[in-house]
């Protein structure tokens, strides 16, 4: 009787989800398309829901979210660490198991598919693993030991993909997959994150065509006004779930729907597509999560959470420039005000560095123009580079290209005794705020600016994408005096302490305390427990006698009433 009641509830939930899916198809396309598309999608979802990997996870998690205070996610390319003659996914698995053990519980493997450019984001085939990295068996092995995040690159495909090659050959079916014009068209209203032209000229079997390419001439935007395109991408999403993926990162999601005479970003039908994905996960894999990568000002970024019916998490794009500003000026005023007014019902993926640079759009409306200009000057002074976007023919800084270690520390002062402490204080901000921390592998290893990569490729972002041979890396991580050892050791110490504090749960309550402009002080509360995280963004001592003899959970000692320069504390 109990089982029959449960089955009935499942059937009712499924019926409700399918009703919502049909309504979204109706909004995106038409009522006449909605019934057919819903039937097609139900058939696909029912097949994938029976996959062993998905069935096992449904049983393990029982619809519960996969992440809590014990979780942090390392961000890495499949080949950031490599060994000659070995599949790089084998090398990555070795690195994760040897150095991160169970302290880091999740891994975001950046695009590992066959690709033609942009660090894997010009995907040739969504359902293949590039043989130089390994195969799906290697991916599934990592997914068995870690919460696995994978990119759904849904805005564009490679110019070398089968779909676009068929387009070039004149296949009528694939003409609908892309956005093209017979003549060059000027569209100044369209928001551009790059300096390259919006339309790229291609010679096809059916004449010269100008094709929409938001990010580069090698990345061809998909036309979601064609239902078949959306269904193709949904099938990719379902396939990833069947391979053990638990977090789907929606890459460049804000750009997917285009309408004439608009900015073509963050449009209403883009949000409908994210809602559709959310319902698909609810039907097939309710344990899984969507992470929206929408690098826009704060209000646009959080819009991808919807009313709890779109993405489960969004990137905290405001955090990297705000933390850098606090340490540059030794003044945490801006980040404290921002943290205080951030809505508590939102779930963020907190990060400071990634395979991209430090985006500036997230700081718009928070930092003053002079503070943003100061970050640009600091980046150039510390040996970094600047990427620009073009609006109405004018260039403006879009992204700081620099490793976060060199952004926080001046490379011209290599003997600075506070380098590691200053850097780790910056990283502790990410670990202390409300959300799920995401740690880029080059931050985890204290990497410096990689100029050779920029010189070889002419790509600014390569400054933070160095590939590391395993043997020298192993040697450095055995050397207690090396920078890499010291940074990794301190990361593991902070993460290990964080895991034991329930108040660091991603959905705990938080209160920002105004103690001193040099301090970030955040009280976290969860189910009757609380902790006060304090970080000094300056090289000055700050007295706090009112907290004397509180217990510091990081070093397991009693606080003596003074915050050290760049000190990090978790007071009970």
Image (tube, rainbow, N blue to C red):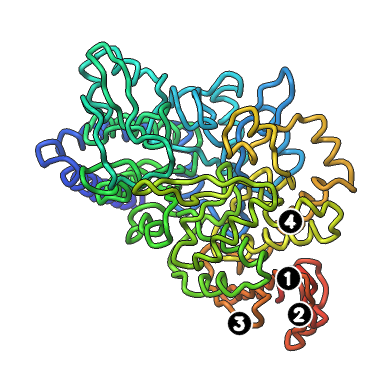
Quadrant of the image occupied by residue 544: bottom right
Left/right of residue 37 with respect to residue 357 in the rendered view = left
Tell me the tag on residue 134: none
Where does label 3 land, which residue?
A: 514
* Label 2 to label 4: alpha-carbon separation: 21 Å
| SS for callout 1 | loop
Q: Nearer the viewer, mark 1 or mark 2?
A: 1
| SS for callout 4 | loop
Where does label 1 land, which residue?
A: 538
Dot 4 alpha-carbon crowd within 10 angstroms: few under 14, some 14 to 19, many 20 or more: many
> How far across and how far down the image is residue 56, in percent?
49, 38
* Label 1 to label 2: alpha-carbon separation: 9 Å
Where does label 4 land, which residue?
A: 409
Residue with the most extreme left position:
32
> How far across and how far down the image is residue 311, in percent?
39, 52
> How far across and how far down the image is residue 194, in percent?
43, 41
* Dot placed on the residue nearer the N-terminal end, 1 or 3: 3
């Amino acid at each position: 009787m109990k089982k029959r009641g449960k089955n009935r509830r499942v059937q009712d939930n499924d019926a409700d989800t399918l009703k919502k899916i049909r309504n979204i198809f109706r909004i995106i396309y038409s009522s006449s398309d909605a019934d057919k598309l819903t039937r097609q999608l139900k058939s696909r979802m029912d097949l994938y829901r029976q996959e062993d990997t998905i069935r096992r996870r449904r049983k393990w998690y029982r619809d519960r979210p996969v992440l809590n205070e014990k979780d942090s996610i390392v961000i890495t390319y499949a080949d950031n660490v490599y060994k000659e003659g070995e599949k790089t996914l084998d090398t990555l698995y070795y690195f994760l198991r040897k150095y991160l053990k169970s302290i880091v519980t999740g891994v975001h493997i950046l695009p590992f598919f066959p690709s033609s450019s942009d660090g894997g984001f010009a995907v040739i085939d969504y359902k293949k693993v590039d043989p130089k990295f390994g195969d799906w068996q290697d991916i599934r092995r990592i997914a068995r030991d870690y919460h696995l995040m994978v990119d759904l690159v849904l805005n564009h495909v490679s110019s070398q993909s089968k779909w676009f090659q068929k387009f070039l050959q004149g296949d009528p079916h694939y003409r609908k997959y892309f956005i093209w014009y017979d003549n060059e068209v000027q569209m100044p209203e369209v928001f551009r994150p790059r300096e390259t032209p919006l339309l790229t000229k291609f010679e096809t079997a059916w004449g010269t065509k100008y094709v929409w390419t938001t990010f580069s001439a090698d990345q061809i935007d998909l036309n979601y006004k064609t239902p078949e395109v959306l269904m193709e991408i949904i099938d990719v999403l379902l396939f990833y779930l069947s391979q053990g993926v638990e977090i789907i990162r929606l890459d460049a999601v804000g750009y997917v729907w285009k309408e004439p005479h608009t900015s073509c970003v963050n449009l209403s039908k883009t949000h409908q597509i994210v809602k559709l994905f959310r319902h698909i996960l609810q039907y097939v894999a309710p344990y899984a999560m969507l992470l929206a990568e929408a690098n826009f000002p704060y209000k646009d970024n959080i819009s991808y959470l919807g009313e709890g019916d779109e993405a489960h998490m969004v990137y905290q794009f405001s955090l990297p420039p705000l933390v850098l500003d606090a340490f540059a000026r030794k003044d945490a005023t801006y980040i404290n005000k921002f943290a205080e007014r951030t809505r508590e019902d939102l779930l963020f993926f907190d990060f400071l560095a990634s395979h991209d640079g430090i985006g500036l759009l997230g700081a718009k409306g928070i930092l003053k123009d002079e503070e943003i200009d100061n970050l640009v000057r600091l980046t150039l002074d510390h040996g970094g580079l600047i990427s620009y976007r073009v609006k109405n023919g004018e260039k403006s800084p879009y992204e700081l290209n620099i490793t976060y270690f060199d952004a926080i520390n001046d490379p011209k002062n290599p003997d600075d005794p506070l380098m590691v402490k200053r850097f780790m204080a910056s990283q502790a901000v990410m670990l202390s705020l409300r959300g799920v921390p995401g740690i880029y592998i080059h931050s985890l290893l204290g990497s410096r600016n990689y100029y050779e990569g920029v010189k070889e490729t002419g790509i600014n972002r390569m400054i933070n994408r160095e590939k590391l041979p395993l043997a020298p890396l192993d040697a450095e991580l055995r050397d207690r005096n090396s920078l890499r050892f010291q940074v990794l050791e301190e990361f593991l110490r902070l993460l290990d302490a964080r895991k034991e504090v329930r108040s660091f749960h991603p959905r705990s309550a938080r209160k920002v305390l105004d103690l001193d402009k040099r301090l970030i002080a955040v009280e976290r509360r969860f189910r009757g427990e609380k902790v006060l995280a304090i970080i000094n963004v300056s090289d000055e001592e700050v007295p706090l006698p009112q907290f004397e003899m509180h217990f510091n959970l990081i070093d397991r000692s009693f606080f003596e009433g003074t915050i050290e320069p760049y000190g990090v504390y978790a007071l009970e």
